[in-house]
Image (cartoon, helix red, strand yellow):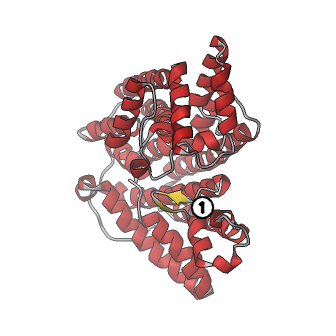
């Protein structure tokens, strides 16, 4: 697919990056869905149209915003807009792939406060669900895997079709290829840590870096810098800033998974605990519990594995146990250090104009919790017991 579309200025996109990317997604989906419909109407309505709706409905367009403000801070002009928006749309499709597949692997029934992709399929075809849990339908899970594959295929089509000169195209495709493999490697390490009940803090951080930090922050920044033909020193500084902020983002998400308000996060609290996720928070809690001989904490966390979802009292007990180890506070301190490191790296980059301020604000924003969830987590930390309700 060649780069197409409507002439849009940098000033227009600057005013609302998310809206500009959404409009670009609507344009590309009209073509993708029309082709899907020409193949088969049921496939189009069940998978292609649902994938388009899933991608368009919800999400803050964080990855395209990183790409955009990096490009602008590196001197991007009106000439760079069409390709930036097209790659931004591709990043949103990669995100859809990741979310749909992640929910399949976790068999999560909710995403953004609504039924996850496979849960929607299961609700549409109840006769094809032989198990008591709709989210566990083999048919629905398999259909969602195909939808995630389709999202990644569409994303690749968009990037392959952009109109770029040889040096920039080489850089963009190199970054894109690396990002896809890193994302899969990180997801595998996440599954492996879960399957082996890993309690390694080092492995948890490596997983965070590959699964989330790079494709959420670092690689979108790199794509924006490459589009604007930034010099190597600037690109490296942006990469380092993005990696630090991206790790902080996932560590914050791990805290919110336990202490956050489901009304804000859109996911049930305690999912990471009950599914046995090998998060940095849990690795720290286990290490500190072992160091102090708190076998009751270790046993409680172990007993909660596989008990999904956790009841209110059980979740309160887990929160209290985690707080007793001091692990949440230690994670908060690491997040603060990562945010400061990200700011130092950003200051070392050779950036231009007011876009630098937008980029700095976005980097800090990704590591900050939503207001209600932050209040709940802070309350839990202060009280030493159950946080969000």
As drawn, 164 above or below 175: below
Q: In the displayed structure, does residue 289 sit left or right of residue 376?
A: right
Of residue 10 and residue 145, the one placed in the foreground of this image is 145
Q: Position of residue 346 (x, y in %)?
A: 37, 29
> Residue 359 appears at what percent x and percent y?
33, 39
Q: Residues within 10 Å of mark 1 (few under 14, many from 20)?
A: many
Answer whether residue 85 is visible to the viewer in this image.
yes
Pick the front one: 288 or 95: 288
State the image coordinates of residue 386 (x, y, percent, origin top left): 45, 34
Given residues 8 and 14, the one toward you in this image is 14
* View extreme (front): residue: 313
Task: Measuring from the top left, give residue 349's x and y in whole percent.
Answer: 38, 29
Residue at the image point whose x is 45% and y is 57% from the top:
112
Q: Residue 190: name its quadrant.
A: top right
Disc 1 marks which residue? Answer: 152
Quarter of image, res 191: top right
* Residue at the (76%, 36%) spot, across then down: 196
Name the foreground residue: 387 vs 45: 387
Quadrant housing residue 8: bottom left
User: Residue lying furthest top in this view?
Assistant: 292
């Amino acid at each position: 697919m060649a780069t197409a579309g409507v002439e849009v200025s940098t000033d227009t996109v600057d005013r609302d990056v998310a809206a500009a990317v959404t409009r670009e997604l609507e344009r590309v989906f009209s073509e993708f869905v029309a082709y899907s419909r020409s193949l088969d109407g049921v496939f189009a309505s069940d998978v292609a149209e649902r994938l388009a709706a899933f991608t368009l409905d919800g999400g803050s367009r964080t990855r395209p915003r990183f790409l955009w403000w990096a490009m602008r801070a590196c001197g991007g002009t009106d000439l760079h807009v069409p390709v930036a928006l097209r790659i931004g749309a591709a990043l949103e499709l990669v995100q859809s792939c990741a979310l749909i597949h992640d929910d399949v692997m976790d068999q999560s029934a909710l995403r953004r406060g609504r039924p996850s992709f496979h849960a929607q399929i299961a609700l549409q075809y109840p006769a094809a669900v032989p198990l008591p849990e709709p989210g566990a339908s083999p048919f629905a899970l398999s259909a969602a895997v195909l939808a995630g594959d389709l999202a990644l295929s569409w994303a690749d089509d968009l990037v392959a079709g952009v109109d770029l000169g040889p040096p920039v195209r080489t850089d963009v495709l190199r970054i894109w290829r690396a990002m896809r493999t890193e994302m899969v490697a990180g997801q595998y390490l996440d599954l492996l840590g879960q399957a082996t009940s890993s309690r390694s803090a080092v492995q948890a951080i490596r997983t965070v870096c590959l699964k989330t930090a790079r494709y959420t922050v670092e690689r979108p920044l790199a794509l924006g810098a490459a589009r604007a033909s930034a010099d190597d020193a600037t690109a490296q500084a942006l990469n380092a800033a993005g990696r630090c902020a991206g790790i902080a983002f996932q560590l914050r998400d791990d805290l919110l998974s336990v202490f956050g308000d489901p009304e804000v996060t859109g996911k049930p609290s305690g999912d990471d605990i009950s599914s046995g996720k090998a998060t940095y928070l849990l690795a720290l809690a286990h290490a500190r519990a072992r160091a102090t001989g708190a076998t009751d904490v270790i046993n409680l966390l172990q007993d909660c594995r596989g008990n999904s979802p956790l009841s209110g009292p059980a979740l309160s007990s887990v929160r209290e146990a985690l707080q007793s180890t001091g692990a949440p506070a230690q994670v908060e301190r690491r997040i603060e250090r990562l945010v400061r490191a990200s700011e130092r790296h950003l200051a070392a980059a050779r950036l231009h104009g007011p876009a630098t301020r937008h980029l700095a604000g976005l980097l800090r924003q990704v590591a900050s919790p939503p207001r209600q969830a932050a209040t709940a987590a802070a309350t839990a930390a202060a009280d030493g017991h159950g946080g969000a309700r």
